[in-house]
Amino acid sequence: MAALDRVKVLVLGDSGVGKSSLVHLLCHNQVLGNPSWTVGCSVDVRIHDYKEGTPEEKTYYIELWDVGGSVGSATSVKSTRAVFYNLLNGIILVHDLTNKKSSQNLYRWSLEALNRDVAPTGVLVTNGDYDREQFADNQIPLLVIGTKLDQIPETKRNEVLTRTAFLAEDFNAEEINLDCTNPRYLAAGSSNAVKLSRFFDKVIEKRYFLRDGNQIPGFSERKRFGGGTLKSLHYD
């Protein structure tokens, strides 16, 4: 069998949000029985059919890099983590729907990965005050995934999802909310499965089918993010 082309997708988010469980579900369509803390980085592979069902259909490997640690880590830890950010083709930003802080920290995770040599200070703001220009020139496809949907009471679900809906808009990305202990949330033909497939197709297109080159420009070649003063993120 001929070797398959591959793309590299980072899976970023705070410790405990369920990144390892999500990656296992995406790659094996199974629930991870005993998830443990990720030290450094763990890599798993998903097989994806690009443009499935069309004449252009082709199979690719999707490498999912589950990066451990905390966005508030010491500079030395961030420097070590930066090695995982080389030659990335896409980013999945993961937050815990029951934890507001994990949602807020997605801005820091994205800035750390997209702009490794700039250390943002303060906290980003949203709901009208957040400066979306920081991500306006981003060429890396992003996907936002909220986990632990099952832990939100039905009476509060609409309130929580309304509060977190701004994330996808801020990142110019699609949003998936799910329970990593239930594979039905990613069942074939579901809206979540369609969004996921569309994201992976976009990652592959950016990597292999750009008219102006076969790879997304490196960090040093792209406009830097994180300029200006960062403010507080408000949920109310």
Image: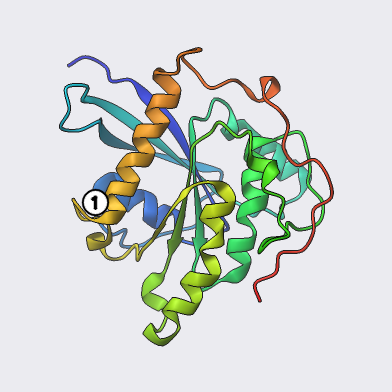
Q: Is residue 18 depicted above or below 199 in this figure?
A: below
- Secondary structure under the numbered disc 1 in the rendered image: loop
Q: Is residue 206 depicted above or below 172 in this figure?
A: above
Instruction: Report the residue marked by disc 1.
Output: 29
The C terminus appears in which quarter of the rendering? bottom right
- Residue in the picture at 50% in, 66% down: 96
Q: Is residue 32 left or right of residue 171?
A: left
Residue sitting farthest toward the front: 128
- Residue in the picture at 83% in, 45% down: 228
Q: Locate residue 174, reporting x and y percent.
A: 44, 50
Q: How many marks?
A: 1
Q: Locate residue 9, reporting x and y percent.
A: 45, 36
- Residue in the picture at 80% in, 40% down: 227
Q: Is residue 202 left or right of residue 217?
A: left
- Residue in the picture at 67% in, 61% down: 126
Q: Amino acid at mark 1?
A: Asn
Residue sitting farthest toward the bottom: 155
The N terminus appears in which quarter of the rendering? top left
